Structure formats: structure tokens, C-alpha cells
Image (cartoon, helix red, strand yellow):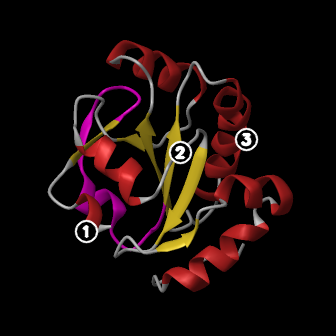
Amino acid sequence: MADVLGGRRLVTRDGAAVEAEAALQNKVVALYFAAGRCAPSRDFTPLLSAFHAALVGEARRPAPFEVVFVSADGSAEEMLAFMRELHGAWLALPFHDPYRHELRKRYNITATPKLVIVKQNGEVITSKGRKQIREWGLACFRSWVEAADVFQNFSG
């Protein structure tokens, strides 16, 4: 993701800033385009949170996976409220970063929610991450890791 988010700061749901390159290095990255006012986003976000927790938060060896939320909310306040209410322990592009709009264009986001799984260089592994998680559960991560060409000791 250095090609896509390099040099940018991301934020946690608690507001802490992190360097994108360090946080995303050697990981499969899921760009999550969503909004708190969107019913389908509110429906899918808890499932994504559980998926992320199972792979990263609760795993004996955390998987090389990170979610980056790209908000389609109407304000920074709406974005933070959505993050605090339903999001997992993942990262977000700050609301006031205009790059949010460039990412929407780059990945052809026309509706939310959309979960785009990308390689380190920003190349799309799948734009159907939401559907795959719903249909395959944790099993879809294996195919993402294989397609991403990241070093991994993941055995889930």
C-alpha cells in the first residue's frame, strides 16, 4: 500500500495517528468504503469487525491483514461516531483528507458499502470482499493472502 497511501497518516477509532506505510507494510489491505447513515453499511460493519477480530485481534498469531476505512459520511463527527459505535480496531483515512475522493475514483466506488481487497502496490485482488466474507467467512482470507504475495506465516 506504499504506492497508494504512502506518506499519509491514518487514524484509529480513538483518534491516534499512525503512519500508513508502517501500519500496512506486508499486509493484505481491505479498503472499506462505508457510511454510518447507510443501512447496508451498518448491517455489514459488525460482520467485518468480527472477521477482523478473528484474524488479527483474537488469533494466536495475528494474520497479515488490515482494514482502512474510507468514509462516505457527511461530516467528521458522523465518521467518528460510526467508528466508535461499530468499527473494529482498524484504521481510517482522516475525514478531511481529500485523498478519500481520489480513492473512490481510483477504485470506482459508486455505492456503499464496498470492501476492496488490494495488494501492497494498490492492485485489486477483489472488489467483492463484502460478498466473499458473507459467503465464505474466514476461508476467503487464504485466497487473498495467496493473491497478495505477502510474506506470511498464516495457517488459518
Direction from residue 53 to residue 35 in the image, left or right? left
Task: Indicate which disc, 2 or 1, sits on the residue closer to the N terminus.
Answer: 1
Frontmost of labels 2 and 1 is 2
Q: Amino acid at mark 3?
A: Leu
Direction from residue 138 to residue 116 in the image, left or right? left
The residue located at (69%, 52%) in the rendering is 130
The residue located at (50%, 39%) in the rendering is 89
Q: Secondary structure at mark 2?
A: loop
Q: Residue furthest right?
A: 135
Residue 110 is marked as: 2
Task: Indicate which disc, 2 or 3, sits on the residue closer to the N terminus.
Answer: 3
Residue 47 is marked as: 3
| Label 1 environment density (alpha carbons within 10 Å; few <14, some 14–19, many ≥20) | some
Magenta segment, which residues? 12-29
Residue 2 is marked as: 1
Q: Amino acid at mark 2?
A: Thr
The answer to whether residue 153 is seen in the rendering is no
Alpha carbons under labels 2 and 3: distance apart: 22 Å
Q: Position of residue 92 (x, y in %)?
A: 38, 40
Q: Quadrant of the N terminus?
A: bottom left
Q: Position of residue 65 (x, y in %)?
A: 51, 62
Q: Can you tell which quarter of the image residue 121 is in?
A: bottom left
| Pointers 3 and 1 in contact (C-beta within 8 Å) | no
Magenta segment: does it hold 24?
Answer: yes
Residue 142 against residue 134 in the figure, above or below: below
